[in-house]
Amino acid sequence: MDEVTPQIIPPTTSCIDRLEDPETLSYDEFFQKYMAANAPCLFSAEFSRSWGGRRSWVTSDNKPNWEHLLQAFGDALVPVANCDVKEYNSNPKELLPLREYIAYWREYTENGHRSARRCLYLKDWHMRREFPNQDVYETPVYFSSDWLNEYWDAIAVDDYRFVYMGPSGSWTPFHADVFRSYSWSANICGRKKWLLFPPGEEEHLRDCKGHLPYDVTTAALQNYCPPPLEVIQEAGEIIFVPSGWHHQVYNLEDTISINHNWVNGCNVSIMWSFLQAELSAVQREIGEWKETMDDWEHHCQIILKSCTGIDYKEFYNFLKIIAEHRIQALQDGPEDNNLQGPNVMAPGPRHVLFDLRKIADTLILLTDNKDFQKLDTETLNPRPEDLLRTLERVIER
C-alpha cells in the first residue's frame, strides 16, 4: 500500500483537514488519521470528478439537471420532508413522485423561495437500491469497508445509501447518525453548511429533561452552546462525518448529495455501546412492569428494534454475516482479495484479519453481556460460543 503522506491543507472555512489529491492519499493514511482517529475531514472535488452524476445530473452552471432527472426517475416515489414543521424532533415526511417534487422545487425557486407548501426537502431516497444500474457515483475506496450495507445487502432487507435533494434553505435538524455510524456525504451540485459537534459536546445542550435541541442556532442556546466546527462544503466535495458527531446541516444553494452510513471494525464498538445505552433507556422506560410482564426482556428487545432498527440477536447476526464473509475471503486466497470483491474491502488480507479480530472482540463483549445472556439464543446458528471459537482458530493461523 502507498505510504505517501497526503497533501492536507487546512481550509479557511473550517477547522477540519482538507484532502486535495486522490493520487497521494492512500487508504492507510485515511484509515489511521481519520477513520481510526474518529476525526472529520473534507475531500476535494477531485475525488468525485469521474462520477457519472456530476455530468448527467448537473447543468453547465452547476444547477440540478431537471430534464435528465425527470427522464430517468420521474415516476419514482421519493420521501419528502417538510423543513418548516417539527414533529418528534424531526420533520414529517410524505411520499411523492419525483416529478411532483421537481415541479414544486422549480416553482419554489422561481417564487423567491416561497410556497404555500413551505420548504420541502427530499431526504433518504434509496436511489441506488431502486436503480442499481444507473451510473451516478462510485463509493470511494476510503469508505469501502462498509459492514452495514454489506450486511443489509446480504439479507436483502434494507440499505443505508441515500440521495438528498433540496432548495436553498432546506436543512436537517440536530442529530447523530443511525447506530452512531460513520457517514460520508458528497455534493453532486450545490453547497452545504455543516455544524459539527465532537462526541460529548452535545451533553452541554441537553435541557432539564435531558432532551437534545432540535435547532442549535436558536437564540436561547447561544450562551450555552459550545461553538461547533463550521464547514462549508462545495460542489463535488465529500465530507467524512465520524461516529457520534452530532451535526446540523443547511443547503446554501439548490443541492443534490449522495450519503452513505457505514460501520466497520474501527467503530463497531461505538455501535455496540450505543445499543447498550438504548436498551438501558428502554428498560428504564418500562421498568415498572418488569415483575408483572411475561418475558419482559423480550419486550425490551422488541422496543429496542422499533427505536433503533436492530436488537441484540440481530446484532449478533450482523457480526456473524460479516465474519462468514471474511473467513470465506481468506479461504478463497489472496488473488480474490481485490477491491472489486463484494465481500472484501481495501486493502486485502491484512484488512480481513483486522476485521476478524474486531468481530471477535465485540463478540466476547456481547456474549458476556447479562442482557444478551437472558435471551433465547438456541435458535442462533452457529451458537455464539461456536462462532467465537471458529474466529479464534482462523485468527491464530
Image: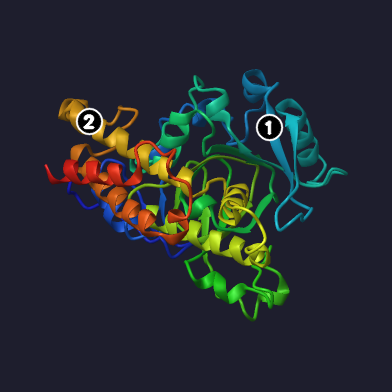
Q: Nearer the viewer, residue 274 or 63?
A: 274
Q: Secondary structure at mark 2?
A: loop
The residue wearing badge 1 is: 78
The 10 Å Cα crowd at callout 1, few under 14, some 14 to 19, many 20 or more, is: many
Picture quarter with the N terminus: top left
Q: Name the residue: 67% across, 63% down.
A: 289
> Which numbered circle lies on residue 123?
none
> Mark 1 or 2, which is nearer the eye?
2
**In this view, which residue lies farthest toward the right?**
116
The image shows residue 86 at horizontal and vertical percentages of: 77, 56
> Which numbered circle lies on residue 337?
2
Q: Is residue 351 in sight in this rendering?
A: no
Q: Nearer the viewer, residue 158 or 140?
A: 158
* 271 in relation to 222, above or below: above
The image shows residue 152 at horizontal and vertical percentages of: 47, 34
Q: Name the residue: 38% across, 36% down.
A: 381
Q: Nearer the viewer, residue 182 or 234?
A: 182
Circles 1 and 2 in contact, beta carbons < 8 Å:
no
The image shows residue 295 at horizontal and vertical percentages of: 59, 53
The amino acid type found where label 2 is placed reads: Asn
Picture quarter with the C terminus: top left
Q: Is residue 96 in sight in this rendering?
A: yes
